[in-house]
Amino acid sequence: MNAVGVAQPRIEGRDKVTGAARYAADVPVPGLAFGAVVLATVSRGRVRDIDVSAVQDMPGVLGVIDHRNAPRLNPKAGGFFGPDGQLQLLQDEVIPFAGRPVALVVAETPELARAAAEALPVTYDEEPHDTGFTADHPAGRPAVTLFDEPVNVGDVEAELAASPVVIEERYRTPEEHCSAMEPHSATAWWEGERLEAIDSNQGPFTVAVTLATLFSLSPDQVRIRTEHVGGGFGSKGLCGPQLILAAMAGRLFGRPVRVTLTRAQVFLATAMRPATDQLIRIGADADGRLRAIWHEPAFEISTLAEYIEGCTELTKTLYAARAIRTRLTAVPLDILPPYSMRGPGAAPGSFALESAMDELAERLGMDPLELRLRNEPVAGPVSGLPFSSRNLVACLREGARRFGWDTRDHRPRLRREGALLVGTGLAASSFSAGAFPSSATITAETDGTFTVAIGATDLGTGARTALTAIAADALKVGTERIRLRISDSRLGPVWSAGGSRGTTSWAWAITEAAEKLRGQGYGGTVTADTTRSLGDLPSRERHAYSAVFAEVTVDPVTGEVRVRRLLGMFAAGRVVSPLMARSQVIGGMIGGLSMALHEEGLRDPVSGRHVNADFAGYHIAAHADVPDIEADFVPDYEPGIPMGVKGVGEIGNVGTAAAIANAVWHATGVRQRSLPIRLDRVLE
Ligand code: MOS
């Protein structure tokens, strides 16, 4: 019996395509009231007045919550990066960014709530704001050092001075928004001093801990369920404004309150990727061997919360170089707090690094594939640690074979088809792998089935399907005997669906629980917690890898870039669910295409406000934007992690933007160092 590695369709697929699956805003709850959020329209200042009397008597309106009557929250509440001022909603009249919630209007129906929210008069005392990000902004300062920054290995200056070829360029990426199909929605109610919620998030347990801290409750007084989640991409990793406001309203109005963000509010009030501006210097010998990589990214943060866009992740591990230096600069501004989004750090960072590597290959007159093979490290270039498993070369070679790379003429602007210029490009990439402490409980039922309970959540990734296979193999039974329970904070401490560490963390807990249960003869109930075994995991360079190949056409008259072909070869450990994993990395690659050509959050420099906070103005690639897309996996196995798995959540995103930018150069002979590669940039 072997379920891991077998192509099983999505367990909840039928429910989803028939509409039976319920997302957070669909779950029926008796006695429900609805809250509509009002967001600040100025980038900095104070609320002067909110005229509640103007809407109080509108039909169906139950009331308004603002900083004058909101429950007091615990200022210590935070998340991964420490205390987070973004959670402190409606605590005072201060406006730290346009899009900050200033009120919640509660009414009997969503339509009445929204009509009253739109009619609510809010006046402000505006203050001068600063939303203009530049790398040399005077407010810039070293980013907090959570990811071992800064790095200084070898003598970068001496190696650059000794390099016959040096690339020194800046690469820029804009603000991007997670844009999950399902807008953020929460329904909350109180049973005495207990808080219940149905929410759309990436980790009901961690979100419940944050919510409990915010409302000064013990974690067992809070229960959060997340049955189906329609995508998160990082923006649902936090305790979101919808949940905090619903919990406040549930308390004040004494009944369940549902708060669903509008699409515009998802843009304006939930996590975005910060803009980056990255200086890279690479020095190499004439044979392509790297002497030095010096990568200094700057990125914007808000004044409310720390955050790290770890753009140097790949710089520290992808290539051998005698000297490597990295330094991250954070620039605090009056903007929506940035947070993790789809391959955080690695996605913009790889655009810079893999574009610069392509520029180096051009200067050397070398095959960009050969340049990468020539700089394959034997150990972590910065850490000195051995690689746990590193199959980047296999990805590059197999991808090149399938893509037909060996017939490529590496000089630019040689291929034409009618009026169109044609080019190809590649990028290598990695995303860190690993696991975080988690717990799982398995009960042997009297009918021969096993109830496997873990507080995991399925964002549409296929977690249900993957964990069912893992549990079946761990228990050495068929999948039909597994009853999986997920999506509930009550199921115990567990890592979230984030950081590409969901499947690894949850598989580990399920495997340990299954071993315990088998050890006691398949009877009773066991709980396993992986905190201790994770502590015994040897330190290694652990990463998933990919090689992405792109073919583009460029219309030299209109500047239009079309991606005609995308191929990704991935080394992502043992593949648990082949269909789900392929779907994940293909989705990630389309996300990377979107990043390359379309996605760009724009601000009005005068008001500091977003001007394209909707799908009319903020463009996202769809399936039709790439007629030929293929992804596959090379054999890979992660030692030390049960089942040998790595994550597939983010590696699909990383690398694609650079592969496309490099293909655009190959087609046109012009480098695109700022994303997205808009028509006007191509025509410049
Ligand atoms: Mo992810 S950006 O860790 O949801």
Image (cartoon, rainbow, N blue to C red):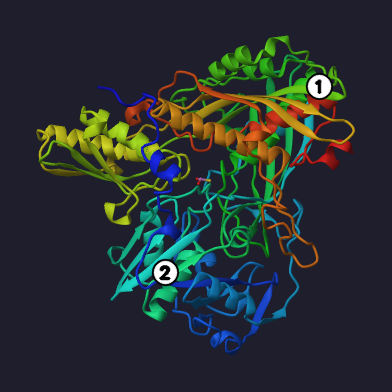
Q: Is residue 670 left or right of residue 482?
A: right
What percent of the width, then of the height, locates residue 51? 61, 87
Residue type, numbered disc 2: Leu
| In the rendered image, the vertical position of residue 670 relative to residue 483, given as above or below | above
Image quadrant containing the N terminus: top left
Q: Residue 214 bears which disc, if any? A: 2
Near-viewer residue (318 or 258): 258
Mark 1 crowd level (few <14, some 14–19, many ≥20, 10 Å Cα): some
Q: Nearer the viewer, residue 520 or 28?
A: 28
Badge 2 crowding class, 10 Å Cα cut-off, few under 14, some 14 to 19, many 20 or more, is: many
Judge by depth and name the residue closer to the eye, 62 or 148: 62
The amino acid on which the numbered mark 1 sits, given as a three-letter code, is Arg
Left or right relative to 93: residue 450 = left
Q: Quadrant of residue 73?
A: bottom left
Residue 154 visible at all? yes
**Occupied quadrant, residue 472:** top left
Q: Quadrant of residue 564?
A: top right
Q: Residue furthest toward the front?
A: 18
Spatial separation of the CA atoms under disc 1 and disc 2: 55 Å
Does label 2 point to a residue whose CB lies under 8 Å from ligand 1? no
Q: Is mark 1 within 8 Å of ligand 1?
A: no
Q: Residue 358, percent across and down?
A: 73, 25
Any mark on residue 248, and which?
Answer: none
Q: Quadrant of the C terminus?
A: top right
Judge whether 387 appears above or below 242 on screen: above
The reply, left or right, for residue 371 in relation to residue 459 is: right
Residue denoted by label 1: 363
* Closer-to-camera residue (199/136): 199
Q: Residue at x 52, y 22 (%)?
A: 632
Residue 382 visible in the picture: no
Residue located 69% across and 48% down the image:
298
